[in-house]
Image (cartoon, rainbow, N blue to C red):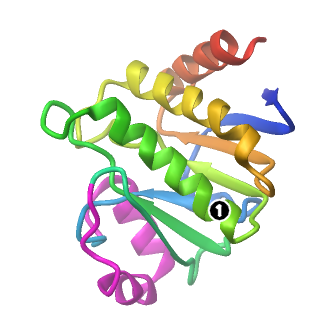
Amino acid sequence: MAWKTDGLTIGCVKGDITQQGDVDAIVNAANAQLRTGGGVAGAIHRAAGPGLAEECRDLAPIKPGEAVITAAYNLPNLYVIHCLGPVYGKDEPAAELLADCYRNALRLADEKELTSVAFPAISTGAFGYPLEPAARVAVKTIRDMTPDLSSVRRVRFVLFSDKDCVTYHRLLDEILGA
């Protein structure tokens, strides 16, 4: 199922973000040092190979809300956009910092004239951001950024579980209309 807003198509799937070969860039829910780590960052680094860690070394550290872009190396994409989401209950204002992740990632994609980006549910894993509020921030931020985008035409949320997909589908319906 896909939702449309101002020429942007937004989709949502359960899957592996490293297997999204039909998008120009995937987003890494990174740590400040842009190192391998666990979760999404670990999966992306393992699939991309050692070149990614080498390129990331010169870009770190990043702060919550910031985003940087690298080549994708062995991934089936052109780029990886690395965002540091807020640690829930520690990095404040959490909602604004999380929104900055999505805004900054979309700006970088647009600057590179990319047409498609796949996002994980940033900050909802080890960083402890509750899924529903995080998804609400993500969907609203992407909707609000749409008029400012010149090349990005497709966004996909790639989620870990069926439960995550149900939450995102409900919020996409609520915020963008069914």
Horizontal and vertical percent position of residue 130: 31, 24
Q: Is residue 143 magenta?
A: no
Establish if 66 lies above or below 167.
Answer: below
Magenta-highlighted residues? 36-63
Q: Residue at x 71, y 46 (%)?
A: 148
Q: Residue furthest right?
A: 7
Count numbered badges in the picture.
Answer: 1
Label 1 sits on residue: 109
Horizontal and vertical percent position of residue 5: 80, 29
Q: Determine the image quadrant of residue 56.
A: bottom left
Quarter of the image where the N terminus is located: top right
Q: SS class of the residue under badge 1?
A: helix
Q: Of helix, strand and loop, which mostly describes the magenta segment?
A: helix
Q: Residue furthest left?
A: 90
Establish if 62 lies above or below 136.
Answer: below
Q: Residue at x 28, y 33 (%)?
A: 94
Quarter of the image where the C terminus is located: top right
For this view, does 7 lie left or right of residue 89? right
- For disc 1, the neighbor class at 10 Å (few under 14, some 14 to 19, many from 20) is many
For this view, does 129 lie left or right of residue 10? left
Q: Determine the image quadrant of residue 93.
A: top left
Q: Is residue 40 magenta?
A: yes
Q: In front: 16, or 121?
A: 121
Horizontal and vertical percent position of residue 86: 27, 43
Q: Determine the image quadrant of residue 8.
A: top right
Identify the amino acid type marked 1. Ala
Establish if 72 lies above or below 175.
Answer: below
Q: Residue at x 38, y 58 (%)?
A: 66
Horizontal and vertical percent position of residue 57: 30, 85
Q: In front: 98, or 15?
A: 98
Q: Residue at x 82, y 29 (%)?
A: 4
